[in-house]
Amino acid sequence: MLGHGAGGGVEAPDLVAVAQAALAGGWTVARVEQPYRVAGRRAPDRAPRLDQAWTEVVAALRGRSRAPLVTGGRSSGARVACRTAAATGAAGVVCLAFPLRPPGRPDAPSRAAELLAVPVPVLVVQGERDPFGGPAELPAGPVVVAVPGDHSLRRSAAAAAEAVGRWLQTVT
């Protein structure tokens, strides 16, 4: 189950590429749009509402399948997947372009605690020049794969998909 970032939708090139790689690996994939996007709004809801909507979708999907669930997303969607991993019973979390801190605000608090609180394996695919935090700035713990590019991962969607495809083979 993959969620989008704050400024985009489920058609982001990296989400599409990762979904295709997961499908090729035998996984069932759901790309989930948050309610604010479905309602036509551009600004995301606050974290509690995003998390609630995410867990409601997981509950609906769980009614259809008992297969292992891997959640994830890009940027804001990755944060939602991290915050809800325990509550949703995820077997793993995929983070594409995890937003460690807002760009241009070096004094802003790090969001590393969200990554470190995940009780299951985590993969982070991060652009080498991501202004939200580069691969070397991420905390120890999650598996981190650096790919060329910035926060959008547009030019490295194939590399992101390859990394996720390999990692999914390790998730039971």
Image: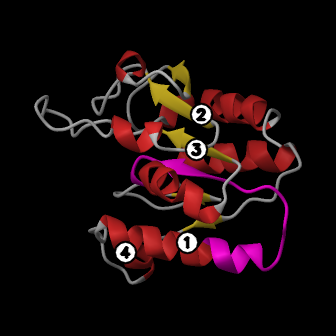
Closer to the camera: disc 4 or disc 3?
Answer: 3
Q: Residues within 10 Å of mark 2 (few under 14, many from 20)?
A: many
Q: Identify which residue, 125 or 51, lies in the foreground.
A: 51
| Left or right of residue 33: residue 40 | left
Q: What residue sits right under mark 4 in the picture?
A: 49
Q: If you read the primary sequence from the N terminus, does the residue marked by circle 2 or circle 4 appear first?
A: 4
Q: How is the image coloured?
A: secondary structure
Q: Identify which residue, 87 or 105, lies in the foreground.
A: 87
Residue 44 vs 95, above or below: the answer is below
Q: What's the CA distance linking mark 1 and mark 3?
A: 16 Å
Q: What's the CA distance linking mark 4 and mark 3?
A: 22 Å
Residue 10 vs 36, above or below: the answer is above
Residue 169 vs 81, above or below: the answer is above
Query: Regarding mark 2 in the picture, which secondary structure is present there?
Result: strand
Residue at horizontal 57%, vertical 78%? Answer: 56
Which amino acid type is shown beneath numbered disc 4?
A: Arg
Q: Residues within 10 Å of mark 4 (few under 14, many from 20)?
A: some
Q: What residue sits right under mark 2 in the picture?
A: 123
Q: What residue sits right under mark 3 in the picture?
A: 119
Q: If you read the primary sequence from the N terminus, does the residue marked by circle 1 or circle 3 appear first?
A: 1
Residue at horizontal 42%, vertical 39%? Answer: 98
| Left or right of residue 37: residue 109 | left
- Which span of residues is magenta-colored? 58-76
